[in-house]
Amino acid sequence: MHLTIHVDRTKCSGHARCAIKGPEVYELDDEGYCISDGKVVSDQALRTQAIHGMKACPERAISIDEA
Amino acid sequence: MSTATVPSHVDPARVVDWDYMNDPRLTTDPYATFAQWVAETPAEVVWTTANGGHWMIMRNAAIVEALQTPELFSSRHTSIPPRPGAAKLIPEELDPPEHTKYRQILNKRLGPKMMKFFDGRTRLLANTLIDAVQERGEADLMEALTVPMPCGLFLEMVGLPTDRIAEFVSWKDELFFGPTERKIAAQGKINGLLKETIAEKRANPGGEDLMSFLVNDGLIDEAPITHEDLMAYAFLFFIAGLDTVTSLMTSCFRYIADHPGTRDALLADKSLIPDFIEEILRRYGVVNPVRTATRDFEWRGITVREGEQFVSSTILADLDATEFPDPLKVDFERENNRHIGFGGGPHRCVGSHLARTEIIATIQEVLPRLPNLRTKPGSVLRFYSAGLVGLTTLPVVWDV
């Protein structure tokens, strides 16, 4: 089972909460903006981090598809 | 209730008389006052007759949307009513795209990857400040720690010696709270010092501080930053990074001083401190952002006219039960605490990573040095509440 992460870059304003709650899933650029749009997470052990990182975004910029 | 300040296009069912700056309850408990307004609001967006009349947004989701929509909700005025005079605060009172170019350079230098510089300096400063009071067993923790700390960090940012903290604190107080002539005098002193600092950095490049970078290596539109803009940035660091951080840091220590269980838990496990700070920021927010309509528009069932002002309070947003169940309860394990204590949209607090770094490090350094920290018995705590909200004193005692 994969999770695909979608990040709306027009909404990302660099809070970096995703990376705090999901440090092994969400990567940030040098300004603290999320660069994980389109990332596929297959490792089941990282599932919780992926979901918590998504829910932590104050801008509601992250969504996740499951396949 | 004066009907003179209710425009004809405002639905009377949405009219209230709430005064977010002068309601007498605010000095005792601004958060309970806000939470009550949220709970009893007749609508998602209301018009208050207070302060000359303005809109108040009463739901978290609507506030987030407003902050994310600068095309409709401009930052051009940071107060209600607008400050007289044309000069804009840079970058707070700018909108994209002009805002973006001033913001980019700060994002890089104050981003999460740049925090090491500040972490070490915060710890040194925190210990120096506590050295001065530890043996007394009591202090106003604001005077001793939470006011001078961000002042010290400001001085670090602009590369000034931190032995000037006391002087800076007095200038800041005159600037924010003094009568007009003193405000102007303080402004002059601050500007004078900043001018000297900029000249010094030009003459002696190579400093590690942020101001040295901006003066010697910073580029906007591929050109060196003008003197005017350097002064604007320095002024921004000054006004945006002092009382805000003080307010949050004080709320953190107040909570610890009133809840020995929390104090002990944080001492036993420092990894709990970051989530603790996030929940304190949600529960005891700091800023009431203001926005101004760029044109006439319809939004969420209301008709807005150009120039009308909104309070899109992040304090209130974070006490909205539709987003945070049982909002007045402090719960460090609150799931998915996506508070907007640092704002949202393009003006998301650029100092948010620094504020977190500063407060985490300060709590980690200070807590073990003030055993059995508690609020001084008999203390009556009061708040100021306007554009910012915070305590005015925090008398504490500890074991020596």
Image: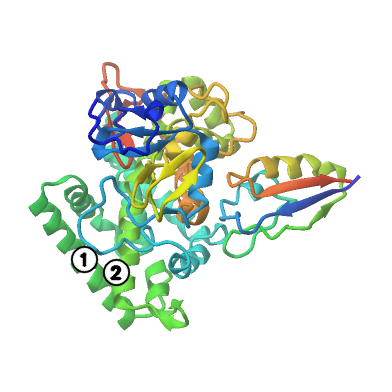
* Mark nearer the N terminus (2 vs 1): 1
Chain ID, mark 2:
B
**Is the residue marked by circle 2 packed among few (<14), some (14-19), or many (20+) residues within 10 Å?**
some
Could you tell me which residue is drawn at 36 percent across and 24 percent down? B33
Give the farthest residue toward the top.
Answer: B378
Q: Which element carries disc 1, helix, strand or loop? A: helix
In three-dimensional space, the C-alpha distance between marks 2 and 1, rounded to whole angstroms, equals 8 Å
**Residue at label 1?**
B191
What's the colour scheme? rainbow
Chain ID, mark 1:
B
Q: Specify the quadrant of the image occupied by residue B265.
A: top right
- Pinpoint residue B337: horizontal percent, then vertical percent: 59, 35
- Pinpoint residue B39: horizontal percent, then vertical percent: 46, 22
Q: Specify the quadrant of the image occupied by residue B387.
A: top left
Give the farthest residue toward the left.
Answer: B181
Could you tell me which residue is drawn at 25 percent across and 46 percent down? B81
Q: Nearer the viewer, residue B202 or B391?
A: B391
Residue B97 versus residue B261 in the image, above or below:
below
Horizontally, is B290 left or right of A36 in the view? left
Q: Which of B210 and A5 is in front in this view?
A: A5
Q: Which element carries disc 2, helix, strand or loop? A: helix
Q: Can residue B171 be seen in this view?
A: yes
Give the farthest residue toward the front.
Answer: B8
- Pinpoint residue B167: horizontal percent, then vertical percent: 19, 54
What label does residue A48 carry, if any?
none
**Residue at label 2?**
B231
- Pinpoint residue B328: horizontal percent, then vertical percent: 48, 23
| Quarter containing the N terminus of chain B | top left
Horizontally, is B359 left or right of B79 in the view? right
Residue B222 versus residue B129 in the image, above or below:
below
